[in-house]
Image (cartoon, grey):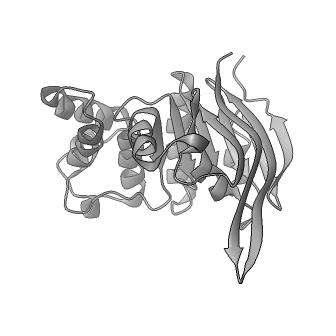
Amino acid sequence: MKKIIELKQVYKDYPQAGIRQIVLHDINLDIFAGEFVAIVGPSGNGKSTLLNLLTGIDYPSRGEVRVNGAPLHTMGQDKLSAWRCGNVGIVFQFFQLLPTLNLWQNIVLAMDFLGKLPKRQRRERALYLLEMVGLADAAQRLPSQVSGGQQQRAAIARALANDPDLIVADEPTGNLDAVTADAVFQLFAHLRDQGKTLVMVTHNESLADAASRKVEIRAGRIHADIPLLSARS
């Protein structure tokens, strides 16, 4: 199987009151194409920091971070920003949709940043993605005119705008009720079945157990790495 993510001896620390506070300790992690990996563990133990390293939002203090062969730990910010647009889709807990743009315009904006798809095809792709997540009838609505669950589904559609191999989500169901959270999770499972690689931070153990693999982070270290029965054959 193709290796999508490779972390080697990764550390991350921050200055705090004049002391270096180590957030991640000696992380070694490989994630392969088509896996759906849930990152779990107590709050404040480094899960979101790990996602920031995988997406190039932050740099490791030491060690190597490679995603789809790209050495993120050596790339400058401009190069990282361009790489991120085309290679990873990010889904946030608080949706991060622009409030003055309707749903399809939010998705087109992600395509505009990369510029890979011809302009005449961008709106058509945005509408296709909204239909895929069950929001075809809401394409013209502003984020404030739809529910939280619909906003999160629109955010997933936006993450798919440039057809990345990797989807990374940080507590994507944290602000949703149980029924809506399950619907969003089923979308992730559908994407996994389409060949996407997904990495999701979640506190929801039942959702984590429905992934194909669960990685537990405690005190900044990998405490457990468990393949689950729901993994695809």
- Name which residue lies at 72% across and 26% down: 231
Judged left or right of residue 10, residue 127 is left
Q: Quadrant of the C terminus?
A: top right
The residue sitting at the right extreme is: 223
The residue sitting at the left extreme is: 120
Q: Quadrant of the N terminus?
A: top right
Judged left or right of residue 214, residue 204 is left
- Name which residue lies at 58% across and 41% down: 74
Q: Position of residue 164 (x, y in %)?
A: 44, 30
Judged left or right of residue 157, residue 43 is right
Task: Pick whichever, 100 or 179, lies toward us.
Answer: 100
- Name which residue lies at 79% across and 33% down: 228
Q: Position of residue 220 (x, y in %)?
A: 79, 58
Asked where in the image residue 118 lies, by quadrant, the reply is top left
Task: Pick whichever, 209 or 82, lies toward us.
Answer: 82
Q: Position of residue 183 (x, y in %)?
A: 51, 44
Relative to 226, say whether 95 is above or below.
below
Task: Pick whichever, 45 or 56, lies toward us.
Answer: 56
Q: Number of marks in the image?
A: 0
Asked where in the image residue 159 lies, by quadrant, the reply is top left
Q: Position of residue 150 (x, y in %)?
A: 37, 52
Judged left or right of residue 192, residue 216 is right
